[in-house]
Amino acid sequence: MKMIMAVVQDKDSALLSDELVEANVRATKLSSSGGFLRSGNTTFMIGVEDERVEEVLNIIKINCESREQYMTTPVNDLAMSSSMQYPIQVHVGGATVFVLPVESFHRF
Amino acid sequence: MKMIMAVVQDKDSALLSDELVEANVRATKLSSSGGFLRSGNTTFMIGVEDERVEEVLNIIKINCESREQYMTTPVNDLAMSSSMQYPIQVHVGGATVFVLPVESFHRF
Amino acid sequence: MKMIMAVVQDKDSALLSDELVEANVRATKLSSSGGFLRSGNTTFMIGVEDERVEEVLNIIKINCESREQYMTTPVNDLAMSSSMQYPIQVHVGGATVFVLPVESFHRF
Ligand code: NI
Ligand code: NI
Ligand code: NI
């Protein structure tokens, strides 16, 4: 048994939850903030058998990996006396993941 | 020293807190949600000496163990044109517990 | 790599965050309550290379260590029929810190 602590961005949290449920992996979410990742984040505490660690890391990677997105924001261009929209590139997502050894696991 | 991470249902949380204080066991509560247990839950982070792990696991088991309860809910029985109450059986409680090794412990 | 879980008082939380950023140490904050320390507290989850554990423990100690403060509170002294202020000594701060072994660490 291992405990996986994964800090992911809030925007990826719902999808990751769904995919873990789909894979029959049990997790609980801890309210977290700041630090490892910009803006709001959620920490998943996941209990998993040793032989499934790679699979779970892969589910996290697929659903939360840092990626680039184009966002279109209105920009006031004073020189042209008009309002224009420029697409800008932003980083979203990303996950910081710790795999911890577990001495014993119990369900009551 | 071990760190015990115990996810328990909110409804068992206050009682568990009291019993841990009574046993002179130090714990802190992390806000958590979803996952291991249905509905609201709380994660207890407990620091405990090796020789007291079994005792603490037992306190968690006694106060949080999954159990069945009868709940009486009003049911509209259309065939009888009347409102009757049926007792239904529900699962409550339950705890998911990880015992983690600790390399060092400090109080400042 | 080690994971440091540090429970500190809310009042020391902002300063500790700043000092960890300054030292280029990555941390995330978990909402926590009660237990190890009186009143509101925050749990820092910090990922750090083995050779920097002592340095991070020292940053926590310096910024969060339990200390005594004098607080001036108004006291109604009935015998003297007047309102006087007495300085009283209170304990503030304090940190409870666990250093946990990490099996593997990943950034996606
Ligand atoms: Ni899917
Ligand atoms: Ni009792
Ligand atoms: Ni400084």
Image (cartoon, coloured by chain):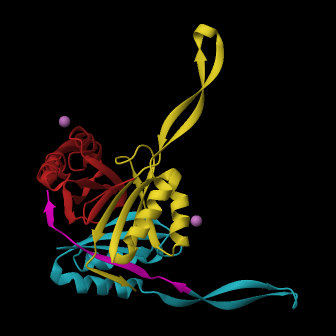
Chain colours: A red, B yellow, C cyan
State the residue in front, B58 or A74: B58
Residue in the picture at 36% in, 86% down: C61
Name the spot of residue B3 as percent of width and height, x first: 34, 70
Q: State the quadrant of the C terminus of chain C.
A: bottom left
State the residue in front, C31 or A5: A5
The kind of secondary structure the magenta stretch mainly shows is strand
Q: Which residues are magenta?
A: C91-108
Q: Is residue A74 visible?
A: no
Q: Is residue B71 visible?
A: yes
State the residue in front, B86 or C102: B86
Q: State the quadrant of the N terminus of chain C.
A: bottom left
Name the spot of residue C14 as percent of width and height, x first: 40, 74
- Residue B54 appears left or right of A94: right
Name the spot of residue C70 as percent of width and height, x first: 59, 90
Name the spot of residue B31 as percent of width and height, x first: 43, 58
Residue in the picture at 44% in, 51% down: B41
Q: Ligand 2 is found in which quarter of the picture?
A: bottom right
Residue B108: quarter of image: bottom left
Does A79 appear above or below C17? above
Residue B38: quarter of image: top left
Residue in the picture at 54% in, 66% down: B19
Residue in the picture at 40% in, 74% down: B52
- Residue C32 appears left or right of C46: right
Does B8 appear above or below C77? above
The question of residue C95 being in magenta is answered with yes
State the residue in front, C48 or B88: B88
The question of residue B55 being in magenta is answered with no
Total labels: the figure holds 0
